[in-house]
Image (cartoon, grey):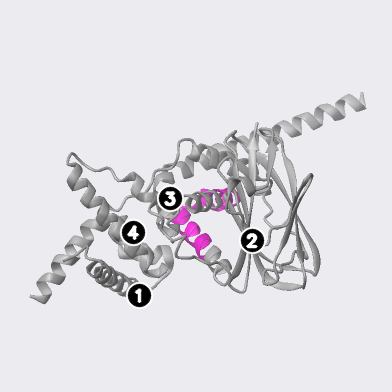
Amino acid sequence: MHTSNTDRQEQELLELLKDYPAPEATAGFYDQALIRATHEGSRRQRNRWLITGFGSAVAAGLVLWLIGGLFLTAPNLPTHDASIPGIAMTLEEPRTVNLVFASAAALDSATLTVTLPEGIELAGFPGRREIAWQTSLVEGKNLLPLELVALTPAGGEVLARLEHNNRNRTFRLRVDVS
Amino acid sequence: MPSSFGTGAFQVARLRVIMSSDANKQTFEKLVRPHFDRLYRLAFRLTGRRAEAEDLFQDLLIKAFGNLDDLVAIDAPGSWLSRVMYNLFIDQRRRLARSRMHTVEEGFLPAEGLDGFPGDQDPVRDNQRLEQLRSLDLALAKLSDEHRIVVLLHDTEGYKIDEIHELTGTPVGTVKSRLHRARARLREILTDDGTFS
């Protein structure tokens, strides 16, 4: 009885797994991926732009400035769109946004993850929607320049998440494209 | 004149480089494009997220193009590409293993694949099936990467045990064991949540 029930469940499971769908690639994705790979792949240098001395004070709280007219003191994640700082970009024109993290103390082995909306790319990382790396922070100000390029007018939110010792802070930057 | 000769020689040399580059691109595309759909599905099965799958797919192409000489010399580029993708995935996971967090709110498999659920002519049956698939999705998220990947590759994508062994470098016996345990764990979870009676 037990065996037949197990067999029946196994059969149900196999049928379910067989039906478990996967999304198809979005239109044009393959072509874009090919172009990026052949035009820029061999020149890609993941670490070229990494900021040495980039630090974290996650436990102590963070201050994020967006240099270039924006100022934000944001130890906590903004929850409403109105509170999210924004920049305006022109289609296909690179723009550098400098993020400055102020840290009260030096800290090693922090992880920074930048997540990009579709249509916004980070220079040097074609086609990537998420870039993550480990780094350390120095005491004081730590600069992270992000050179963004808008490939579509959709815009969206750029997220910069800093993690250390199972604690994290996420900062949002709204990007409007014209 | 020396100056114009020099310019002409430079242009010829540059043109050769461009032609060579174009030939490389054509060769590359011819080798990889037939495998795109399978590789994309593999990327999605490995990562469980569309955005991560697309990043992984892109990383694979960039790496493969950088190793075009190797790719050209390979008899079965599809298998080679799959292995490179798997290794890239493992490298990324290892790199982030210590720092990356998946909270309950974020989930791990956000059911993006269910958008592709085709359904049939019966909306009631479709709805029931979709609910079952959602339960499966949640159950899969509770498995370890090793178990999830093996069961998805074998039972969903139709890879043979030997193919998974070739792809992952995992011994055949271990693949079988993981498959058995993954199924058992899924049955257990789906029974507990009432999906299976």
Read off the chain for label 2: A
**Picture disc at residue B40:** none
**Residue B192's x, y, as percent?**
24, 70
SS class, disc 2: loop
| CA distance for labels 4 and 2 | 32 Å
- Amino acid identity at mark 3: Leu
Q: Residue at x 75, y 34 (%)?
A: B13
**Picture disc at residue B39:** 3
Q: Nearer the viewer, residue A173 or B5?
A: A173
| CA distance for labels 2 and 1 | 45 Å
- Mark 4 or mark 2, which is nearer to you? 2
SS class, disc 3: helix
- Amino acid identity at mark 1: Thr
Residue position for label 2: A76
Mark 3 touching mark 1, by CB under 8 A? no
Q: Are marks 4 and 2 on the same chain?
A: no
For the record, the magenta segment spans: B61-90
**Picture disc at residue B137:** 4
Q: Earlier in the sequence, mark 4 or mark 1?
A: 4
Q: Are marks 3 and 4 on the same chain?
A: yes
Q: Residue at x 33, y 60 (%)?
A: B152
Q: Quadrant of the N terminus of chain A?
A: bottom left
Q: Residues within 10 Å of mark 1 (few under 14, many from 20)?
A: few
Q: Residues within 10 Å of mark 4 (few under 14, many from 20)?
A: many
Q: Residue at x 37, y 65 (%)?
A: B148
